[in-house]
Amino acid sequence: MVALAELLGRREFGDRLRLAAHQFASRHANLHTPGQEELADAWKSRSTRSRR
């Protein structure tokens, strides 16, 4: 996250970006290894969209 802050030219945003990334990760499913519920939800969502 510090690298992103440096890229934006705002190094002082590093801590805030790191905190935001941590909060996002703790509230959402792990995209690298989704659990059975996440896979089932994704499948249901995909099936619903294909019928439209």
Image (tube, rainbow, N blue to C red):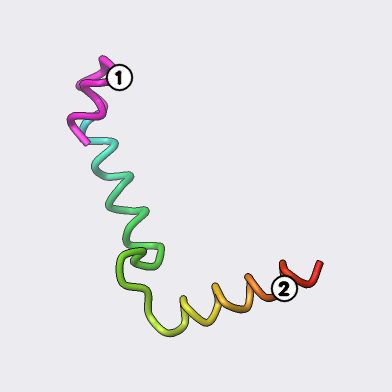
Residue plotted at (57% across, 77% down): 43
How many neighbours does mark 2 have within 10 angstroms: few (below 14), some (14-19), or many (20 or more)? Answer: few
Q: Position of residue 6 (x, y in %)?
A: 21, 21
Q: Is residue 15 left or right of residue 48?
A: left
Residue plotted at (18% across, 31% down): 2
- Secondary structure at badge 2 equals helix
How many neighbours does mark 1 have within 10 angstroms: few (below 14), some (14-19), or many (20 or more)? Answer: few
Q: Is residue 35 left or right of residue 46?
A: left
- The answer to whether residue 4 is magenta is yes
Residue plotted at (47% across, 78% down): 39
Circles 1, 2 touching at the beta carbon (< 8 Å): no
Q: Distance between the residues labelled 1 and 2?
A: 39 Å
Q: Is residue 15 above or below residue 36?
A: above
Q: In this view, does 5 lie above or below 31?
A: above
Q: Is residue 1 above or below residue 49?
A: above
Q: What's the magenta region?
A: 1-13
Q: What residue type is labelled 1?
A: Leu
* Quadrant of res 4: top left
Q: Which residue lies furthest to the top in this view?
A: 9
Q: Which amino acid does label 2 sit on?
A: Thr
Q: Position of residue 12 (x, y in %)?
A: 21, 23
- Secondary structure at badge 1 equals loop
Which numbered disc covers residue 48? 2
The mark lying in front, picked from 1 and 2, is: 2
Q: Residue furthest right?
A: 52
Q: In this view, does 28 lie to the left or right of 49?
A: left
Residue receiving disc 1: 8
* Quadrant of res 16: top left
